[in-house]
Image: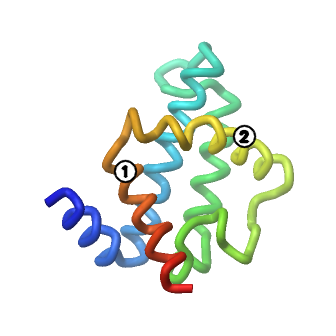
Amino acid sequence: MLFIGIWKGACDMDTEEKRREEMDTMREILTLYCKAHHHTPAAGKDLCADCDALLGYALHRIGKCPRMAVKTFCAVCPVHCYAKEPRAKIKEVMRYAGPRMILHHPFMTLRHMFIQWRSRARR
């Protein structure tokens, strides 16, 4: 039953749903990273100032992505729209938080893995 839910959700998303899902995932990944590496959240926020700025940058890029309808994830997109420094920082965040997401957000992680698997199978 769980697999069916992951399959349906991953296959039936329109562009804006994909965009929202990617934004939610980015928020969760950065929150996980920030809590482990920085212990100084800004007033009223879950993130420190640096991670909050990185999240703002990432959400802006995701919001403006012209390939959202056809791409799976930024890592496999042929267009690299992140500047060099934020891109390196996002890679660092992903290396840390990506494997830990299965413990904190298992459904989100399984969905992500399924979408990756499906996109590789289509190639």
* Residue 37 higher or lower than 3, as above or below: above
Is 121 or 48 nearer to us in this picture?
A: 121
Give the percent coordinates (x, y) of residue 42: 58, 21
Give the percent coordinates (x, y) of residue 98: 55, 43
Mark 2 lies on a secondary structure that is helix
* Residue 47 higher or lower than 68, as above or below: above
Residue with the most extreme right position:
84
**What residue is at 34 percent from the left and 70 percent from the top?**
10
Is 69 or 10 nearer to us in this picture?
A: 10
Q: Amino acid at mark 1?
A: Met
| Mark 1 surroundings within 10 Å by alpha-carbon count, few (fewer than 14), some (14 through 19), many (20 or more) | some
- Callouts 1 and 2 close, C-beta under 8 Å: no
Which mark, by number, is residue 92?
A: 2
**What residue is at 32 percent from the left and 77 percent from the top?**
11
**What residue is at 50 percent from the left and 35 percent from the top?**
100
Q: Left or right: 114 with respect to 97?
A: left
Disc 1 or 2, which lies upstream in sequence?
A: 2
Q: Left or right: 110 with respect to 120?
A: left
* Residue 83 higher or lower than 54, as above or below: below
Give the percent coordinates (x, y) of residue 78: 72, 77
**What residue is at 84 percent from the left and 47 percent from the top?**
85
Is 25 or 114 nearer to us in this picture?
A: 114
Residue with the most extreme front position:
121
Mark 1 lies on a secondary structure that is helix
Q: How is the image coloured?
A: rainbow
User: How far separated are the C-alphas under marks 1 and 2?
Assistant: 20 Å
Question: Pointer 1: what residue?
Answer: 108
